[in-house]
Every structure is written in structure tokens, then in C-alpha cells.
Amino acid sequence: MGRDTEDMALPSPCVSVCQLDEGSGLCLGCYRTGAEIAAWRSMSPAEQHELLNTLRDRRAAVTGVARRAPRRRRN
């Protein structure tokens, strides 16, 4: 029986480019703050999903690449 993806913990958004930018405080690889990196494992799946949405927006703002529309859920 499948579980709703909102209930499942997600893999870390880390891309193994672990360097915090001194100016912004964001990781140059995943765009998380140090506090967000430290909190990832203790976040609920819903909080992780919310942070992933925030990270997509941050990445788009920093890189100038428009955020891709989320994929539709398959039923």
C-alpha cells in the first residue's frame, strides 16, 4: 500500500558542493543556510517539501534561471 509522498522523508538536497557564501550565508551547492542544513534530518516531510520549494525559488533568484513548474502528481 503506497504512502502519500507528503508523509515520506526526503533525501537531502545536498549536491556535495559544500561551501557557504560569506555574503549571503547560503551554500553554493544547495542554497540552504547553515541552520537549514543542520535542521534537515529533524524536519517533518511537510517541512522538507516546503524548504525544497524555497530552495527552488532561491536558486532561480541567484542564477537567473526561471523556476521550472512542478511536476503533476500521478494518481
Image (tube, grey):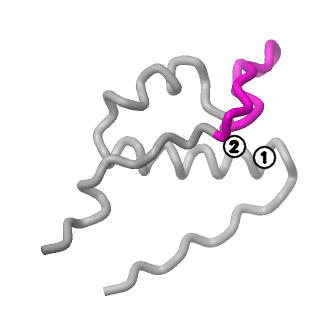
For the residue carrying disc 2, how many other residues have a C-alpha within 10 Å: few (<14), some (14-19), or many (20+)? some
Q: Which element type, helix, strand or loop, lies under badge 1?
A: helix
Disc number for residue 11:
none
Tell me whether the residue at label 2 lies in contact with that at label 1, contact meaning CB atoms closer than 8 angstroms. yes
Q: Quadrant of residue 55?
A: top right
- Residue at (31% x, 86% y) in the render: 75
Image-based side of 74 in relation to 6, left or right = right
- Magenta: main secondary structure equals loop
In the rendered view of the protein, which quadrant contains the N terminus?
bottom left
Q: Is residue 21 magenta?
A: yes
* Residue pointed to by mark 2: 58
- Residue at (68% x, 34% y) in the render: 16
Question: As rendered, which of 66 and 39 lies closer to the eye?
Answer: 39
Question: Which three-letter amino acid code belongs to the residue tagged 1?
Answer: Ala
- Residue at (57% x, 45% y) in the render: 54
Q: Quadrant of residue 67?
A: bottom right
For the residue carrying disc 1, how many other residues have a C-alpha within 10 Å: few (<14), some (14-19), or many (20+)? few
| Extent of the magenta region | 15-30
Looking at the image, which residue sits at the far top? 22
* Residue pointed to by mark 1: 61
Question: Which three-letter amino acid code belongs to the residue tagged 2?
Answer: Arg
The picture places residue 43, in percent across and down from the top left corner, at 33, 33
The picture places residue 17, in percent across and down from the top left corner, at 74, 32
Image-based side of 63 in relation to 10, left or right = right
Looking at the image, which residue sits at the far left? 1
